[in-house]
Image (spheres, rainbow, N blue to C red):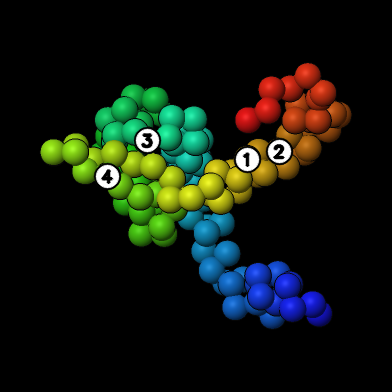
Amino acid sequence: MSADKQGCGFSTESPYVELAVEVFGMLADATRVRIVLALTDAGELSVNHLADILDKPAAAVSQHLAKLRLARIVATRHEGQRVFYRLENEHASQLVRDAIFQAEHSLGGTPRHHHADRVSS
């Protein structure tokens, strides 16, 4: 096993495997995936703006955001009474993007993301 693989946690013995499973579990919810997608597109949004985008009650979106915040997937910025959410880093966005690409493969045929004319995201 190479030192690079072990240093990054890419081995079967990695102590990060269980934490990775927790991240997958946190993202195993359609509303949370949609929150990640919305924040990927917008960069930063308030709870009410996210609720409008997702067509969900603000209280429900707030609960999902609280869980994502505890998992360090999203971060906050306060502006007076308002709280704005953003992705903590690019990794959750990449996980969601890859999961959607994998879902496209499950439909058979040539997935959209393999089309030469697709717009890069």
Task: Give the image location of residue 109, x and y in percent.
Answer: 86, 29
Name the residue at 81% across, 80% down.
Answer: 1
- Helix, strand or loop for disc 4: strand
Residue corresponding to mark 4 = 77
Q: Quadrant of residue 98?
A: top right
Q: Is residue 112 visible?
A: yes
For label 3, the crowd category at 10 Å Cα-Cα, with few meaning under 14, some 14 to 19 and many 20 or more, is many
First-in-chain label (2 vs 3): 3
Task: Name the residue at the left extreme.
Answer: 80
Task: Give the image location of residue 96, x and y in percent.
Answer: 59, 43
User: Where residue 44 is drawn, which disc sits there?
Assistant: 3
Q: Which residue type carries mark 2? A: Phe
- Helix, strand or loop for disc 2: helix
Residue closer to the observer: 119 or 22? 119
Task: Name the residue at the front extreme.
Answer: 4
Q: Which residue type carries mark 1? A: Arg
**Is 6 left or right of 46, judged from the image as shown?**
right
Residue corresponding to mark 1 = 97
